[in-house]
Image: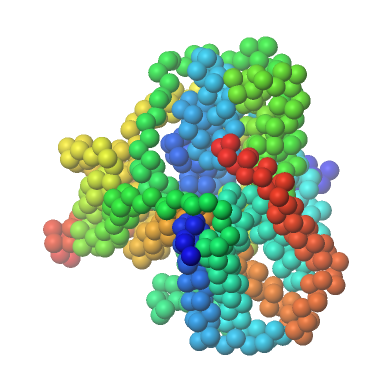
Amino acid sequence: MELIANLALGFQTAVSPMNLVYCLAGALIGTLIGVLPGIGPVQTLAILLPTTFSLPPVSALIMLSGIYYGAQYGGSTTSILVNVPGEASSVVTCLDGYQMARQGRAGAALTISALGSFFAGCFATVVLAVLAVPLSELAFKFGSAEYFSLMVFGLIGSIVLASGSMLKAVGMIILGLLLGMVGTDVTSGVQRFAFGIPELADGIGFVSLAMGLFGICDIINSIEKQEKRDILKQKLTGLWLSMADLKAAAPAVLRGTLCGSLLGILPGGGAILSSFTAYMLEKKCSRNPESFGKGNIRGVAAPESANNAAAQTSFVPLLTLGIPPNVVLAMMAGAMMIHGIQPGPRVITSNPDLFWGVIVSMWVGNAILVLLNLPLVGIWVRLLSVPFRLLYPAILVFCCIGLYSVNNNTFDIGLTALCGLLGYILHKLECEPAPLILGFILGPMMEENLRRGMLLSRGDPSVFFTRPLSLTFLVLAAAMLVVVALPNIRRGREKAFKEE
Amino acid sequence: MRIRHPKDFLTGVMFVFFGTAAMVLSMGLTIGKAAKMGPGYFPFVLGGFLTALGVLILMRSLLWTAGLHAWPVLHFKPPALVLSSVVLFALLLRPLGLMGATLVLVIVCSRASHEFQWKEAVLNATVLILIVLVVFVYFLEFQVPVWPSFLAPHA
């Protein structure tokens, strides 16, 4: 019953006319940016972060969730229509989605992806609501040692997912942790690594780092590629699904949802892992697996439901434990901190309207996507035919103005260019920026808990191994490292990333 | 000895650079001891880890990598033009105002594309300036100088 009361409170917040407008605006702008090829949810969030800063925290987070879902939906649209995935999580959608589009069934593919996502969203919202209270109560039992170990566990999880060399991913995490140290040290008040620059006293701006590493850097990469896109010329007809399609897709949606909800909660999980897994699972379950990759509707339904379910359940670790399990959620965490809300178990008691409002708004956002974006799909398609050389200057203009508006200074714009340069170098060296962002977000918290933990134990590091919960996290982290390092699994993992 | 894996080699160099920089800079702060860590403790340890990791990756790229791998392919134009257009926007926003800075940003970054055309870029800039004026200046009442400072009426 408490659950229903909580959800009711959420509804009250999310469905207030103002928040509804922000959710709608977020979903629309998110789709608008996310539909651009090569730009996925992470980039979209990075680019649009500043637009939400002038809003009250609840509305800002609701709008950001809207942007996130819109971007994800936009990414699926480009995967299906242009065969260019916005980000890794929609890579799988390309396989069957684009084939369906070539067979003239783009409408059906888009519809099932929206409906599947909506169903997954509804289910995952309930999962999130059910798990949130007990988990955040558990989190209250955590001491510094547990938090530190949990963060180690979370960071190791992000390595498992990074493609390419594991050593490089570890290095990226450490680099991120170090970048997070820039600015005033909370405990002693001393300036660290700020080189006397007053603008760095509060640390490197999260928006600058995120926008540089993802927004600007990806624009440069897209220009470099000079790729020719073959856009589907034929008209989009028939958004309605046939009964046969629906019957084929329904079980796939269900399986995808379950798979995604489960994997989303794990650190390092989230949308990418779950859409891959759901696709594999669907292929395994199928009576004729050879039809996959040739326009099987189940190959669109399962991963699309899974990545949406995972996107939603990955809020569980962020909102209850304060640990962002993947980059997208790291963006959310960054946005929350900018609004003065420390993500973690306290949110649910100190800002219940925010907590439940955001949860319900995810569901509302999904509903808006189905009701509004599906009919608008023609406009999004037309946007795709605008050449990239005209679009990217526009994105850059909005990025720069957005950056200026954060603090009304031009320093942030310059810093972003510097981060863009770093991102470009990292890209050339095949180092993934995702672990860096996670390290950056977790760095200050990790240091604080390490210091406090060691202070309480009088400098005895065994505290991390003698407290059972803390030990559990460390053992799990070690196990994850070992598993990924095993030759067999490593080969399989390399293969999985190659398939992109 | 040959650099068998240039990308790894350069990554190693980068990690060693950032790692040692962190260690050196941390030494200028109070390090403290395990029971009472100063502001330099954690970054010093992290810097140490990063340096060690960098050395490991460096060694691997020189000694233990099978086969020869390619050097990263660099295109100078796109990153240089896009990044400098952003920096120019930052530098010119106050002196040239929003309109001037936007014009420079759009023209410079458009040149990064291999399909650049003057006419198209100028047209694009004009349209974008109009959109910016309507959305940011008129609707969002964005606090920023719009006109170049030498044209603005002196208050």
Q: Residue furthest top?
A: A243
Give whichever of A155, B51 is nearer the camera: B51
Relative side of A373 to A288, left or right: left
| Residue in view at x 43 percent, y 21 percent | A232
Give whichever of A361, A416 is nearer the camera: A416
Q: Does A146 sit above or below residue A238?
A: below
The colour style of the image is: rainbow
Residue A417 visible in the shown view: yes
| Residue in view at x 56 percent, y 53 percent | B66
Q: Does A148 sit above or below residue A375?
A: below
Residue A36, how many percent across, how many down? 43, 36
Relative side of A197 to A477, left or right: left
| Residue in view at x 51 percent, y 71 percent | B16
In the picture, the quarter occupied by the C terminus of chain B is bottom left
Give whichever of A279, A26 is nearer the camera: A279
Q: Does A19 sit above or below residue A119?
A: below
Residue A309, how many percent across, how many down? 68, 38
Residue A229, how many percent across, how many down? 39, 29
Residue A475, how many percent across, how many down? 80, 62
